[in-house]
Amino acid sequence: MSTKRRLLDRVTPVAYLSPTLLLMCILMLVPIVLVIGYSFMSNVIMTKESVFVGVANYFKVLKDPVFHEALWNTFVFTVGSVAIHMVLGMVFALLLNSKMISTFTRAFFRVIYVLPWVFTAAIIAILWRLILDPSGVLNYLLRQVGLIHQPIAWLGTTQTAMLALLLINVWAGYPFYMISMLATMQGIPDELYEAAMVDGASPWQQFWNITLPQMRPILLSLGTLDLIWTMQQFPLIWMTTGGGPIHSTEMLSTYTYKLAFNQYQFSMASTSGVVVLIISAALAVVYARTQRAGD
Amino acid sequence: MKPKKLAQKTGVMIALIAGACFAGLPVVWMVSSSFKPNTQIFAYPPHLFESDMSWTAYAAIFTDPEKVRFFLNSYLVALSVTAGTLFVGIMGAYAFSRWEFRGKRVLNTLIISVQAIPPITLLIPYFGLIVALGLYNTYWALILTYMVFTLPYAILMLTGYFNTIPRALDEAVMIDGANRFKALWQVIVPVSIPGLVSVAIYTFMQAWNEFLFALTLTKTNNMRTVPIGIQLLMGQHNYEWNQMMAMSILGCLPVLILFLFFQRYFIGGMTAGAVKN
């Protein structure tokens, strides 16, 4: 009886987990093993006889000037987005958390501030293409106030495309920060602020010495998660600039996608994909560390 | 003291309104453009209201079977993924929550780390894999793929939730003669509704918004989802801007409605996802 019971105790959890394990093995584990394997082969999928070529593909990718550009652009786009997201999210959360406004005002503005978040990347991309068009409304407004004299194709000019992309991604991404930060701010005990006010601390001092330290763990978590997500961003870039003009907004994601599905260089694409995987994994380790530090 | 307070309050209000312009004006412009005739989209000077605004763009979408199909596909896929992820996730989370077994820690770590895997890396072998499985250009390809992406969060979130439910509850039901499976579905699941709602909303949104795999794993227009449908509209020679904007508004409605009705769960779910491991 007891051995039967013990056996049952070992088999049952596996049975409950089996649908998860099956899905994860076939659709997650297998592709990862395959993609790593592809990166060491001469061109796969398109040719029948592909051979093991060692790290040759890695040398080829790492020497490709377009890859360098993609790496640099991804860095600029990711770090820029995360930094602005964090500042803007914080400013908006502080505004919404202000004691000066009524509950109704707060609820009203919160819904407006959250709006960008209900749109998927494809929708955000076309909305901003409409707004940033040379004959679009932003160019009109900027000309009316005299900031520019000629309409600018913000997404179609090498000097401005990255800036435009950053603007779009900032608009798309700050609500996630804002809501998480607001929830954390509301959890900071009032007594801390009351004690600080008794000591005569200014609002600025209260922010630096109470709010910010209390929010350190969530800022770290949000920042690292956003680094991972932004680095992998594809649809927003694909549907606005497609990586152009002349690679000025080429990112690792668009570079990899084009290698695979425009040039059918699946081995090279796999290699570039593995590079993205390695960077993500490194960031994920940092994320796991911040989690443990926060406990 | 009084005038200083007034000045502060005015300052906060001005900042709030400025922020609201940044957040909301693009959306206002989207709504306005969806009611304009396509010839007036880039009218100079631009107006928020044109004299001949109408529902034409919306009517054009609702009377085009191909575009209606994008929406039906999106609803079908997103709802199936939500149901599937909830079912599989509940079972998996129950195992994590109620048993100690060999490899549990490793498995748990693996499931967490899966969330950091870049979709673009998976995509290259994925295409061949889906073709080999005979799922290319089917709903199953999208449903199973999205389940793989949403299951880790579901399992982590629900394991945490189930851990807060005393084991004594399962045992009490089992003494009454029910087996574990029944105990899970008839007792544990009903008391976990808030956790399940958070997971359901998260899962639905992920499936509703996904772009890269929907683009690659489907081929014919009758299998396309809304995000891809919007991209297809953009690929045409004449941009039907008003229709694209109308489609965008229709495309965000389910998420907007979910948000307005379940704000509490959204915030709980989002922060849990960001803060807990």
Image (cartoon, coloured by chain):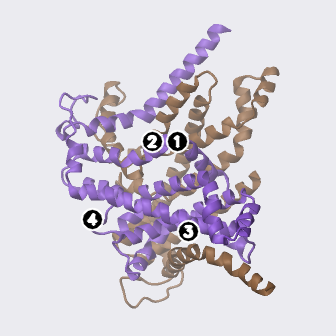
- Residue A262 appears in which quarter of the rendering? bottom left
Residue neighbourhood size for the residue with mark 4, other residues' Cα within 10 Å, grouped as few (<14), some (14–19), many (≥20):
some
In brown, which chain? A
How far is disc 3 from disc 2 in space, using C-alphas? Answer: 31 Å
Q: Is mark 2 on a helix, strand or loop?
A: helix
Chain B appears in which tint? purple
How far is disc 4 from disc 3 in space, using C-alphas? Answer: 28 Å
Amino acid beneath label 1: Pro
Please check whether the numbered discs 4 and 3 fall on a single chain: yes
From the viewer's perspective, is B51 left or right of A67?
left
Residue neighbourhood size for the residue with mark 2, other residues' Cα within 10 Å, grouped as few (<14), some (14–19), many (≥20):
many
How far is disc 1 from disc 4 in space, using C-alphas? Answer: 33 Å
- Does the CB distance between marks 1 and 2 fall below 8 Å? yes
Q: Mark 3 points at which residue?
A: B88
Residue at 36% from the left image edge and 43% from the top image edge:
A128
The chain letter under disc 1 is A
- Does the CB distance between marks 3 and 2 fall below 8 Å? no
Q: Is mark 1 on a helix, strand or loop?
A: helix
Q: Residue B222 carries which label?
A: 4
Q: Mark 2 points at which residue?
A: A116
Whether residue A69 is situated above or below residue A174 in the rendered picture:
below
The chain letter under disc 2 is A
Q: What element carries label 4?
A: helix
